[in-house]
Amino acid sequence: MIKRDNLRSDLVRYTVVLMSGTLVAQILGYLFVPLITQLFTPNEYAEQGIFLRIVALGSALATARYELSLPLPKADVHAFRLFRFGLRVAFFTALTASGISLIYFAFVGENAYDLLFWALIPIMILLLAFFNLGTNWSIRQKVFKVISFARMTNSLLGNSFRVAFGYLGFGASGLIVATVLGQIGANSWFMRQYLKATRNFRVKARSRRTLVLAREHRDFPIVNPPQVLMELGCDVLE
């Protein structure tokens, strides 16, 4: 009975922490909206929307959805091996996206804005991949306040840079760069957890054990990405 009460109290506490962080992040976003909408045109917002949709499509593939497997292993070291594996997949995905962006810019790009647009896509894909991995690792470690702080930092930092770049007249490039900077700020919270786990577990970058764990959880890259890609692909085509 005592254990059930403890589980319920922990669940309530964790839920409150997550909801409070999300709520504060949304409130911050709403507070900035009236100011930001005065600084950017609808066309500039549309450019940002295209950027975010492309990034969302790439990030769906970036980790092969291995971030969803992090809460499952019994041992933390095994979960961290999957974290490292998912991060390696994300690096290769980002490199592939860099090559595609370079080729596309070579044939279609016309100015510095196009170069910035396509150069930031693989960077943002990698940032989102690390954010997703860090979020699920934090869930496993039950450090929900880290997730809340990351979301609040993303909202506050990203919107602050949008306002600053809007006043400077940076246009769509300002919106995109501000989004990237906000994500970097959010990821700094998860980077602390990652570095701490790296010191504790000392997992090698390449290991047979890691490959075994990846094969054990191969349902995630096989089953989940196609569905996500179909949903995001439809959004991009709309």
Image (spheres, rainbow, N blue to C red):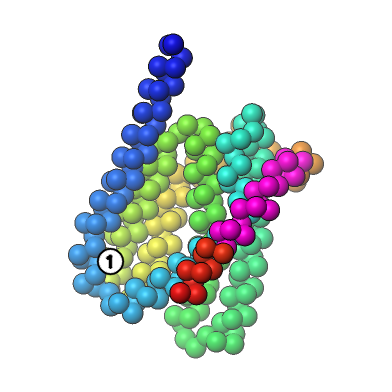
Amino acid carrying mark 1 in the image: Ala
Q: Quick one: quadrant of the C terminus? A: bottom left
In depth, the one of 129 and 195 nearer the eye is 129
- The residue under label 1 is 164
Label 1, secondary structure: give it: helix
Answer yes or no: is residue 98 visible.
Answer: yes
Range drawn in magenta: 212-229
Main secondary structure found in the magenta portion: helix
Q: Quadrant of residue 33?
A: bottom left
Q: Quick one: quadrant of the N terminus? A: top left
In depth, the one of 27 and 220 nearer the eye is 220
* Picture residue at 28% right of the left edge, 46% below the top: 24
Left or right of 13 in this view: 112: right
- Residue 93: percent from left, percent from top: 64, 62
Residue 228 painted magenta: yes
- Residue 126: percent from left, percent from top: 55, 58
As displayed, is residue 7 above or below residue 212?
above
- Residue 152: percent from left, percent from top: 34, 48
- Residue 165: percent from left, percent from top: 31, 69
